[in-house]
């Protein structure tokens, strides 16, 4: 259990001062793109000068302040979809879109649909989201299931965005797919790897497609997508869940790859497991100070996992607590009935971000709350958004 934070009037005065900076930096991270001048898009920060598919949740939160820019992100990815259905994982401000790997976490269709509902986009936009999401799902089905398992396979380290994590490097796994094309699998003994988080992402995509089809009155399509989602969910439970450990693991031809990492949160994010299953996992791992209940949660790897990197290097999903994990937790803690824990997590990060030596960084040392990262000039967008959420939670009005 995360310890509660209490902010006094002195703290709140400091929050107000830093909030002005946070809003200014967030607005400054909305940029024109040289190759696509018709868009202004929210970048991840000056160290990451571009738009990433794994950052699509950033725009969900931005929609509360700047709905036009948030929707631009969705339009951009839909317009850049490859003819075969693959979505780009990234586009830098000065380059063309890239398709080296998947690098996606919260299902695109779910994110796009939630933003569209939040800002009341017209029916034509919902129809386009459905077409794009359905084409992406078919790409995953055709190109990332060589084993015929029904699950989505991981082919490279950056497929899941878990940089420098042994779970996605062990066995000689390369950073990107061969030929810089997400359809290509490397020739390795550990391949293909049946992926927990990518399979859950696809489930979330199908679940959103079914919901979207129902909203559009597409009864047969809704039924088809719901049936596909159910079959996939059953396969995830059958092949990737370890009853003894009460944990979901990737599976290679050699068996379970037993790394206890934050990939488990992506099961929650895409609403794959039941409430009962969630409650058991959460109690065992997220209320345990030897696992994910670190002083500065949530570490990228369980504190007691043998693969935990005790050198705490920068940009490490092998140890550090990532702001992306905390921001995404805002999307699943409520869903699984943990509003108080959501508040405690948010305010714990707020305490770290309020520190004078923390200019909106991307990760924290899970035991000390310090940052091992190179400072991101201009501020890291997920940290800026989390700070705005935290300020609101303390009762401070956001003047955007």
Image: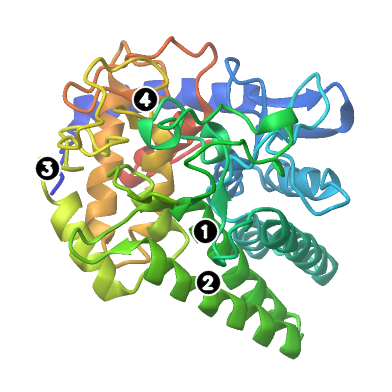
C-alpha distance separating marks 3 and 2: 37 Å
Residue named by callout 3: 3
- The mark lying in front, picked from 1 and 4, is 1
Label 2 sits on a secondary structure element that is helix
- Say if 212 sits above or below 316 in the image: below
Label 3 sits on a secondary structure element that is loop
C-alpha distance separating marks 1 and 3: 33 Å
Residue 26 % position (x, y): 57, 27
Residue 136 % position (x, y): 73, 57
Label 1 sits on a secondary structure element that is helix
Q: Earlier in the sequence, mark 1 or mark 4?
A: 1
| Mark identifier at residue 199 | 1
Residue depicted at 34% across the width and 74% down the height: 274
**Residues marked 4 and 3 touching at CB (< 8 Å):** no
Horizontal side of 100 relative to 235 (left or right) equals right
Q: Earlier in the sequence, mark 3 or mark 2?
A: 3
C-alpha distance separating marks 2 and 4: 33 Å
Residue named by callout 4: 363
Residue depicted at 21% across the width and 20% down the height: 310
């Amino acid at each position: 259990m995360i310890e509660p934070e209490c902010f006094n009037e002195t703290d709140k005065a400091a929050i107000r001062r830093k909030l002005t900076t946070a809003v200014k930096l967030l607005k400054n991270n909305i940029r024109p793109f040289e190759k696509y001048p018709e868009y202004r898009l929210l970048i991840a920060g000056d160290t990451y000068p571009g738009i990433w598919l794994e950052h699509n949740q950033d725009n969900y939160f931005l929609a509360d302040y700047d709905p036009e820019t948030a929707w631009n992100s969705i339009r951009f990815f839909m317009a850049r979809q490859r003819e075969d259905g693959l979505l780009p994982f990234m586009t830098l401000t000065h380059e063309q879109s890239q398709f080296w790997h998947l690098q996606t976490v919260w299902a695109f269709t779910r994110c796009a649909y939630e933003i569209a509902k939040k800002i009341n986009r017209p029916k034509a936009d919902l129809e386009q989201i459905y077409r794009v999401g359905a084409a992406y799902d078919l790409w995953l089905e055709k190109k990332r299931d060589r084993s015929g398992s029904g699950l989505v396979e991981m082919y490279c380290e950056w497929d899941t965005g878990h940089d420098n994590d042994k779970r996605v490097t062990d066995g000689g796994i390369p950073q990107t797919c061969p030929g810089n094309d997400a359809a290509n699998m490397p020739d390795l003994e550990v391949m293909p790897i049946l992926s927990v988080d990518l399979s859950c992402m696809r489930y979330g995509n199908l679940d959103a497609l079914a919901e979207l089809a129902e909203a559009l009155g597409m009864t047969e399509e809704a039924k088809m997508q719901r049936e596909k989602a159910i079959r996939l969910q059953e396969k995830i439970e059958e092949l990737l869940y370890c009853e003894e450990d009460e944990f979901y693991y990737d599976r290679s031809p050699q068996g379970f790859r037993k790394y206890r990492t934050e990939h488990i949160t992506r099961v929650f994010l895409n609403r794959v497991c039941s409430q009962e299953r969630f409650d058991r996992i959460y109690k065992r791992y997220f209320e345990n100070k030897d696992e994910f209940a670190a002083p500065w949660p949530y570490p990228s790897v369980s504190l007691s996992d043998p693969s935990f990197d005790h050198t705490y290097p920068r940009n490490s999903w092998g140890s550090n607590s990532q702001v992306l994990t905390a921001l995404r937790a805002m999307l699943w803690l409520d869903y699984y009935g943990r509003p108080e824990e959501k508040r405690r997590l948010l305010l714990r990060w707020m305490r770290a971000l309020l520190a004078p030596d923390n200019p909106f960084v991307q990760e924290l040392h899970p035991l000390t709350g310090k940052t091992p990262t190179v400072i991101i000039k201009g501020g890291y967008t997920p940290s800026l958004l989390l700070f705005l959420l935290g300020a609101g939670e303390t009762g401070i009005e956001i003047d955007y």
